[in-house]
Image (cartoon, rainbow, N blue to C red):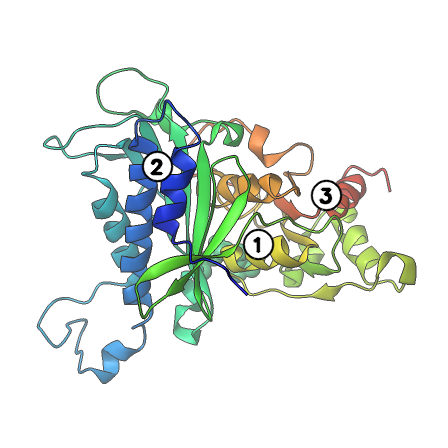
């Protein structure tokens, strides 16, 4: 039984007090992100109603043009973040180039990268989708931020997190002091602390990947997945397969239950399919903060030095022991 209600806002403020030199800028950024999450949630929860409410030809009842949800989420997050004075530059999975802060607003010392709506091809089937964010401290001094500020390796993140719009809406984030989850109570419009200091199990029994790609994986990857299916009581095999096709949902389940989420390289996507900066790096930060492990097959995702905004990477996230075994198969040691 909960002894006190801890809202996300209050939690952020209390965390700030642990840092006597904090200016409040970082807390302000997190507050803006939580507002962005609620605005996106409000629209996501109406997905599918547009047609019932009389929309015709992408126009809603008030005559406004109805935007695709991923475009809506992209603009909403940008607009919630552009004028707080906390961010100097942003980049989004939906946009080719970096996003500048409008001239009339002050530029801050943080850099925000985000995937506004991950899993958007699942929207029409009412399946879990989410938003992912990654925050860095700027490395250029003065002026408005540049591409250089955005292209930083994951270990330099000062915060990362995601919002899942599922059976409930959950905001999960870390600033390097544990991973915490807050569930939205829509009746009061507040995120309430529901998952304090999440720790991923050291080993799980679920694997999560698109096994339809089996024939175009490396031999090591194929052997690893076959290994997971062999019966062995002492290591809880065979593992169960769970795959939604929304990375943020599959990774969230992996965070809570353990096991492995992977999108390996294949013949069609030799560099992997998922994006380093918007999907893999922030989720790797969360998983590692919770005591898990991330890998691109040879090193932690957090050590990969990015060379372009939209680059892809093979990704393996999950329980420490599961990822280690997977790496050994990939490297031909098993
Ligand atoms: P969409 O946003 O286009 O639905 O893509 C989702 C995604 O980037 C990621 O969230 C999933 O893990 C992955 O793609 C699913 O890819 P496959 O359909 O190839 O399994």
Q: Quadrant of residue 290?
A: top right
Q: CA distance from mark 1 to mark 3?
A: 14 Å
Between 157 and 67, the residue placed more toward the observer is: 157
**Residue 238 as seen in the image, left or right of residue 104:** right
The mark that comes first in sequence, 1 or 2, is 2
Q: Can you tell which mark lies on residue 320? A: 3
Residue 115 visible, this orientation? no
Query: Which residue in the rendered view is the most extreme toward the top?
Result: 141
How crowded pointer 3 is (Cα within 10 Å; few <14, some 14-19, many 20+) is rated as: many
Whether residues under marks 1 and 3 lie with C-beta atoms below 8 angstroms apart, the answer is no
Residue 174 visible, this orientation? yes
Which residue lies at the image location 77% right of the left edge and 56% below the top edge? 225
Query: Which residue in the rendered view is the most extreme toward the front?
Result: 3
Between 330 and 253, the residue placed more toward the observer is: 253
Give residue 40's position: percent from left, percent from top: 30, 59
Question: Tag count in the figure?
Answer: 3
Q: Can you tell which mark lies on residue 251? A: 1
Quickly name the residue at label 2. 112
């Amino acid at each position: 039984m909960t002894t006190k209600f801890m809202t996300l806002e209050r939690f952020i403020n209390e965390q700030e007090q642990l840092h006597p030199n904090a200016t409040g800028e970082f807390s302000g950024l997190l507050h803006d992100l939580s507002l962005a999450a609620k605005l996106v949630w409000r629209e996501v929860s109406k997905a599918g109603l547009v047609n019932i409410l009389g929309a015709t030809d992408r126009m809603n009842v008030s005559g406004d043009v109805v935007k695709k949800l991923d475009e809506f989420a992209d603009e909403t997050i940008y607009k919630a973040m552009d004028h707080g004075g906390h961010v100097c530059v942003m980049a989004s999975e939906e946009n080719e180039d970096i996003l500048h802060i409008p001239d009339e607003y002050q530029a801050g010392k943080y850099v925000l990268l985000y995937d506004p709506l991950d899993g958007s091809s699942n929207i029409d089937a009412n399946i879990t989708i989410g938003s992912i964010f990654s925050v860095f401290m700027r490395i250029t001094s003065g002026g408005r931020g540049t591409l250089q500020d955005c292209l930083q390796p994951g270990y330099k993140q000062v915060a990362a997190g995601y919002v899942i719009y599922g059976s409930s809406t959950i905001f999960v984030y870390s600033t390097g002091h544990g991973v915490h989850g807050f569930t939205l109570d829509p009746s009061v419009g507040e995120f309430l602390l529901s998952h304090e200091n999440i720790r991923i199990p050291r080993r799980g029994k679920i694997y999560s990947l698109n096994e339809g790609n089996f024939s175009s994986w490396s031999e090591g990857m194929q052997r690893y997945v076959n290994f997971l299916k062999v019966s062995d009581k002492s290591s809880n095999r065979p593992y169960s397969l769970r795959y939604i096709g929304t990375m943020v949902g599959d990774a969230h389940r992996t965070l809570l239950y353990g096991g492995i989420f992977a999108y390996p390289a294949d013949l069609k996507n030799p560099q992997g399919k998922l994006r380093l900066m918007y999907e893999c790096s922030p989720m790797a930060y969360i998983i590692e903060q919770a005591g898990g492990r991330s890998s691109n097959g040879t090193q932690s995702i957090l050590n990969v030095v990015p060379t372009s905004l939209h680059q892809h990477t093979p990704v393996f996230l999950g329980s420490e022991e599961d990822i280690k075994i997977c790496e050994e198969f990939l490297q031909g040691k098993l």
